[in-house]
Amino acid sequence: MIQIFLSIGAIVLLSIATLSMNRGFEANDEVMRSSKYAVIATSLAASVIEDAAGMAFDDITADSMVTDPSGLTSPGYLGLESGESIHTADDFDDFNNYSQYDTVDVGGVFNKVVFLTSATITYVASSSPQTTSTSATMFKKISVSVTCPVMTETIRQEMVFSYFRFQ
């Protein structure tokens, strides 16, 4: 009779240990998936910032030098000019109100995951890059965010782009 109770106890302990291990594996898989999505989202955000940073500071600075920020695009007109698309963008602020969906094959259970990348451009004060300026300055900030239905948090990246002229 004691052997039966010992056998039942051993089976219960084995079952508890197996369930605990399975929960641990599941949690580990969730962390790995979340990390994979975060890396992809970070890469998408960095790619938009790199594309924008490769452009001229402003539409007018593509062809000439500017010494006074009043000659730059007004804050209310940041974005694509008439007739432009993101594929023909020629200056940094063309990325204002940028939005793009990217479908990425991540393998596993969720084979294809859709990421939404969006960006805004603002002028910022030279003394404080966190302060949005209501007038044109020699400093523009790009703020990029990437969301995804399977991610719990939004990935955000920012960069300040400055205009300097060299003599």
Image (cartoon, rainbow, N blue to C red):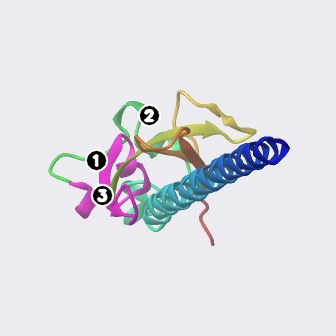
Mark toward the start of the polypeptide (3 vs 1): 1
Q: Which residue is mark 1?
A: 80
How far is mark 2 from mark 3, CA to CA?
32 Å
Depth order, front residue of 155/71? 155
Q: Amino acid at mark 2?
A: Pro
Q: Which residue is mark 2?
A: 75
Marks 3 & 1, CB-CB < 8 Å contact: no
The answer to whether 65 is drawn above or below residue 80 in the figure is: below
Identified at 67% across, 52% down, the residue is 18
Marks 1 & 2, CB-CB < 8 Å contact: no
Q: Nearer the viewer, mark 3 or mark 1?
A: 3
Q: Which residue is mark 3?
A: 103
Residue 2 percent across, percent down from the top left: 85, 43
Quarter of the N terminus within the rendering? top right
Residue 101 shown in magenta: yes
How far is mark 1 from mark 2, CA to CA?
13 Å
Q: Residue furthest right?
A: 2
Residue 9 percent across, percent down from the top left: 78, 43
Mark toward the start of the polypeptide (2 vs 3): 2
Q: Nearer the viewer, mark 1 or mark 2?
A: 1
Residue 7 percent across, percent down from the top left: 76, 49
Mark toward the start of the polypeptide (1 vs 2): 2
Identified at 59% across, 64% down, the residue is 165
The span picked out in magenta is: 85-111
